[in-house]
Amino acid sequence: MRLRSWLAPLLLVAACCHPTTTGPVNTPASGATCADMCKHLADLHCKSAEPTPDGASCPEVCENIRSAGVVPLNLECRVRAPSCEAADSCQ
């Protein structure tokens, strides 16, 4: 299985271009979770829902990103996205 080819560049760009906030980041107001996002992405057959080559699951990767607090993940947007491309566009 291939590494999510969009994830590394997305993280790099987001880390470089988005200012950090002083409050908690990556906390979805709707209550959407990494598990919710990953299930939806899997239902859409998105590559980003697949495990990494090292075996990390989508929820593990998502939680690692969220806990690092560097890149905000709009989980609500990703859970509601009608396609993989739309989910990738969420900020």
Image (cartoon, rainbow, N blue to C red):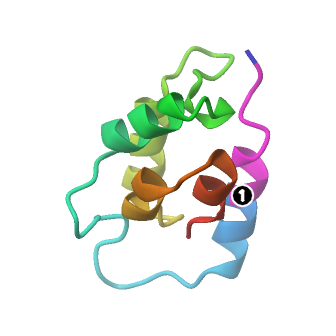
Amino acid type shown at disc 1:
Leu
Judge by depth and name the residue closer to the eye, 80 or 4.
80
Judge by depth and name the residue closer to the eye, 70 or 87.
87
Q: Where 29 sits versus 31, above or below?
A: below
Q: Where 8 sits versus 38, above or below?
A: below
Residue 71 screen position, x and y as percent: 53, 64
Q: Where 57 sits versus 64, above or below?
A: above
Judge by depth and name the residue closer to the eye, 81 or 30.
81
Q: Residues within 10 Å of mark 1 (few under 14, many from 20)?
A: some
- Residue annotated with mark 1: 10
Q: Is residue 6 magenta?
A: yes
Disc 1, SS: helix
Report the span colored magenta: 2-10
Do we see residue 64 in this rendering? yes
Residue 62 screen position, x and y as percent: 45, 43
Picture quarter with the N terminus: top right
- Residue drawn at 65 percent across, 68 percent down: 15
Q: Decide if residue 62 is on the left or right side of residue 83.
A: left
Q: Is residue 7 magenta?
A: yes
- Residue drawn at 40 percent across, 57 percent down: 75
- Residue drawn at 37 percent across, 61 percent down: 76
Residue 22 screen position, x and y as percent: 35, 85
